Image (cartoon, grey):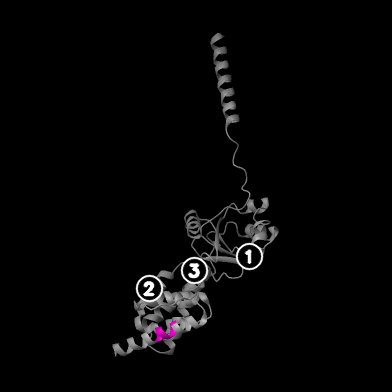
Amino acid sequence: MARWLTLAVLTLGLALAASAQEQDQPPADPQPRSIPMGEFETVLARGMAEGKVTVIYFTADWCGWCRKLETSAFVDPDVIRAAEPFVFAKVDVDEEPQVAAIFGAFGLPSFYMINARGELLDQRNGYLTPTDLKQWLDESAGKALAPGVFQDALLTLTATRRELETMEPGPEADATVVKVVEGLSRSQRLGRAETKQALVAAGAKAWPGLAACLEREELAIRAAGSDVLKASTGAGLAFDPFADEPTRAEQVKQWRRWIDSAAVLSD
């Protein structure tokens, strides 16, 4: 009996100690006060690695609607709970203009939703009420492996790369190059490196078309065309896709003169 009582007391003591220890533990972390957000590349890589949908939020210090959004929808408890299956990245368009150019995100605030393969699933522009944002997140939960809207565009680019290999210099080649650069300027990640490589491999045949991209109104196309042209030619000429129009026009003239002189030397 004494032995049984000792065992019972020991068991009760251990239980009480465990209970006291649990009470001494700090409480679990409360729900975040706002949707957690991180740096673009880190968050996107995490989303793709963990099989989650990434939401990219574009903003700027001067954006009044962004401030309203951050003090209403982002701190709403229901929205925070709806955001738990996602990872969020915050991009300041003034600090990261290249990222903004790739997505064409210049109307603020803007949201871009990316699946786990790096393809664009959906986007929203303008201020979202807490109800609107929660509804969008609820509708998009579980879509990490859903096909992105650029899958068809990717197939088109694959076919276009074959055109690059067989094209002859001239207006049709220029149009083909511009079409490929338009695809590169979009936000899809799959196939971008291979498409750029195909443009570079096309060599001098692609240069006039790439120069035409430098004159386009769309910043993303100018940036993509400039990147490929510099990689393809190896020339040290400048082109700033963010510069004002007169500056860009002068830089394009220099590029066209260089391309013309290179063509003469190759004849």
Instruction: Classify the position of the N terminus by image quarter.
Output: top right
What residue sits right under mark 1 in the picture? Answer: 63
Q: CA distance from mark 3 to mark 1?
A: 19 Å
Tell me which secondary structure the magenta stretch mostly adopts. Answer: helix
Q: Is residue 212 left or right of residue 25?
A: left
Residue 153 within the segment the image draws in magenta: no
Q: CA distance from mark 2 to mark 1?
A: 38 Å
Question: Which residue corresponds to the image point at 53% horizontal and 68% vertical from the top-left?
Answer: 100
Query: In the rendered structure, which amino acid carries the disc numbered 1?
Result: Cys
Residue 71 seen anywhere in this rendered image of the structure: yes
Instruction: Classify the position of the C terminus by image quarter.
Output: bottom left
Query: In the rendered structure, which amino acid carries the disc numbered 3?
Result: Gln
What residue sits right under mark 3 in the picture? Answer: 98
Q: Which residues are magenta?
A: 251-256
- Binning the other alpha carbons within 10 Å of mark 3 as few (below 14), some (14 to 19) or many (20 upward) gives some
Q: Secondary structure under badge 3?
A: helix
Residue 199, image x, y percentages: 39, 77
Residue 143, image x, y percentages: 56, 59
Q: CA distance from mark 2 to mark 3?
A: 20 Å
Q: Are marks 2 and 3 in contact (CB under 8 Å)?
A: no
Residue 115, image x, y percentages: 53, 61
> Of the residues tagged 2 and 1, which is closer to the observer?
1
What residue sits right under mark 2 in the picture? Answer: 197
Residue 187 seen anywhere in this rendered image of the structure: no
Q: Is residue 51 above or below residue 123?
A: above
Of all residues, the one furthest to the top in this rendering is: 2
Q: Secondary structure under badge 2?
A: helix
Q: Secondary structure under badge 1?
A: loop
Query: In the rendered structure, which amino acid carries the disc numbered 2?
Result: Gln
- Binning the other alpha carbons within 10 Å of mark 2 as few (below 14), some (14 to 19) or many (20 upward) gives some
- Binning the other alpha carbons within 10 Å of mark 1 as few (below 14), some (14 to 19) or many (20 upward) gives few
